[in-house]
Image: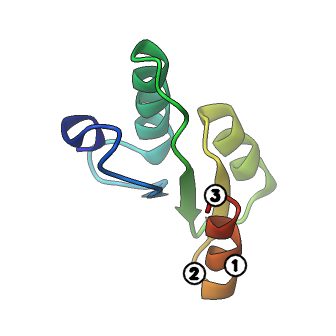
Amino acid sequence: MVLARGHEYYSLILCDLHMPRKDGYQACREIREWEVNNRLARMPIIALSANVMSDVQDKCVAAGFSDYVTKPVDFISLSRAMSKFF
């Protein structure tokens, strides 16, 4: 979906880690690869997950996420994460 719309269409992506057809890690890696291949600036991508295990944040960094917010979403935490990019 992101790749179909183009890089300028979105300012920020909120991406759940557990989606039906493709997990968030793979989606983020594909977006990052697309950015590199098209010489585009990195778009902020914030991971959302109910999993609070410490390794999840490490996996998010490895996949290329810009930040990580746990669910249920605390809107103050989400606002802080988003404010890093705007």
> Which of the marked residues, 2 or 3, is nearer the chain's N terminus?
2
Q: Secondary structure at mark 3?
A: loop
Q: What percent of the width, then of the height, locates residue 38?
A: 39, 17
Q: Which residue corresponds to the image point at 75% horizontal and 59% vertical from the top-left?
A: 53
Query: In this view of the protein, which residue sits in the foreground, 75 or 57?
Result: 75
Above or below, comparing residue 17 to residue 30 in the picture? below
Q: Give, as a three-letter code, the residue at label 1.
A: Ser
Q: Residue furthest top?
A: 37
**Residue 61 sits above or below residue 32 on the image:** below
Q: Are marks 1 and 3 in contact (CB under 8 Å)?
A: no
The numbered disc on residue 85 is 3
Residue 32, image x, y percentages = 49, 29
Q: Which residue is mark 1?
A: 77
Question: Mark 2 is on which residue type?
Answer: Val
C-alpha separation, residue under disc 2 versus residue under disc 3: 18 Å
Task: First in sequence, mark 1 or 3: give its number.
Answer: 1
Q: Quadrant of residue 23?
A: top left
Q: Amino acid at mark 3?
A: Phe
Circle 2 sits on which residue?
73
